[in-house]
Image (tube, rainbow, N blue to C red):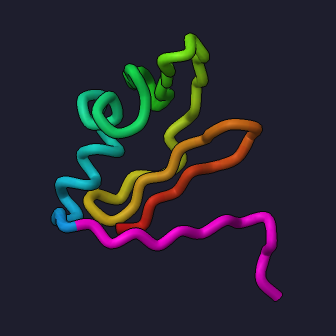
Amino acid sequence: MEDRSIIRWRVHLASPPERVYAMLATAEGRCRFWAASAEESDGVVEFRFTNGQVLRGRVLERDPPRRFAVEYFGGSAAAFDL
C-alpha cells in the first residue's frame, strides 16, 4: 500500500540535472528558486522568506546531481530526484 502522507510531483524542466541541482543545493540557487535567502552552515539551511518567516532545515541527503533532500515545514522533508 502506498504511503498517503507522501506528496509526489513530476515536473519536466528544460535544464540539465546539474543546473537544477545547483538551484537546490547552493545559496545562490535557492535564493533564485526557493526563498529570499537560504544560506547553509554546518549542514543546516536557514531559509528566509519575503514575509519575514525563517525556517531552519537540516540537509538530509546530497547526491549531486541526482538527489537533494532537506527538512522542511512541520517536520516534513522536501526531496528532489533529478
Q: Is residue 57 above or below residue 51?
A: below
Lateral position of residue 77 relative to residue 65, left or right: right
Give the residue furthest to the bottom.
1
Quarter-of-image position of residue 52: top right
Give the answer, above or below, for where 11 lies relative to 21: below
Residue at horizontal 34 percent and vertical 35 percent from the top: 30
- In the rendered image, residue 37, in percent from the top left (x then y), is placed at 38, 20
8 in magenta: yes
Residue placed at 79% from the left, 64% from the top? 5
Front residue of 16 and 59: 16
Residue 59 lies, in percent from the top left, at 50, 40
Majority secondary structure of magenta residues: loop
Residue 38, horizontal then vertical, whole percent: 40, 24
* Left or right of 49 in this view: 12: left
The correct choice, above or below, for 54 with respect to 80 in the image is: above
Q: Which residues are magenta?
A: 1-13
Residue found at the very far front of the displayed protein: 51
